[in-house]
Amino acid sequence: MTQQNAGTALAQEMARRRGKVYPAHTWIAEKFPDYVKVLVELDEVIRVKPRRFDEKMHELFHIVALAVEMSNPPNQPHLKQHIKRALKLGLHPEEIAEALMVCVNPCGAKVLTYGVTCMLEAIEEMKAEAPNP
């Protein structure tokens, strides 16, 4: 398998696991397939093997980490993608908001405001994306 083919396969696997194609992931996978292979293997260890926390909780951890670390507009699509996935897995908006509220004391109110804003936008996007009956 050529480097490009390996990279394409890895990029497709990353997109499948994340539920979205990120152009940056595709480019990195095609240029540095050995690096992305390690990321996919790490994801396997963290998220696929049986652990104490289920996939829904892993998404909640992603949401909190992204809201705390990158409370800025360019990060909104990434954060909203994790929120959508968490909601589809059965996490309730109130659970997401409560986890974000826990962050207020150590990280400031911007985390709560930013996170809930992204959550509300994600919910509206999901409504718009849903097939009409």
Image (spheres, grey):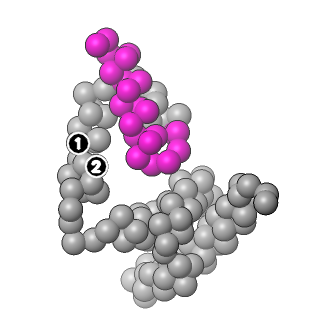
- Outermost residue, right direction? 132
Instruction: Please state if 128 lies on the left or on the right of 16 as rendered.
Output: right
Q: Quadrant of residue 53?
A: bottom left
Res. 87 in view: yes
Q: Residue at x 28, y 41 (%)?
A: 39
Q: Residue at x 62, y 67 (%)?
A: 118
Q: Quadrant of residue 10?
A: top left
Q: Which structural element holds mark 1?
A: helix
Q: Which mark is residue 43?
A: 2
Q: Nearer the viewer, residue 60 or 13?
A: 13
Magenta-tinted stretch: 1-22
Q: Is the residue 94 above or below the residue 51 in the image?
A: below
Please tell me whether residue 16 belongs to the stretch shown in magenta. Answer: yes
- Outermost residue, front direction? 133
Res. 32 in view: no
Q: Residue at x 37, y 71 (%)?
A: 57
Q: Does the residue at mark 1 contact the one at mark 2 (Cβ under 8 Å)?
A: yes
Q: Is the residue 37 above or below the residue 108 in the image?
A: above
Q: Main secondary structure of the magenta part?
A: helix
Residue 104, given in percent of the width and then of the height, sits at 47, 84
Look at label 1 and name its amino acid. Glu
Crowd rating for badge 2 (residues with CA inside 10 Å; few <14, some 14–19, many 20+): some
Q: Residue at x 27, y 54 (%)?
A: 48
The residue that disc 1 covers is 41
Q: What's the CA distance linking mark 1 and mark 2?
A: 5 Å
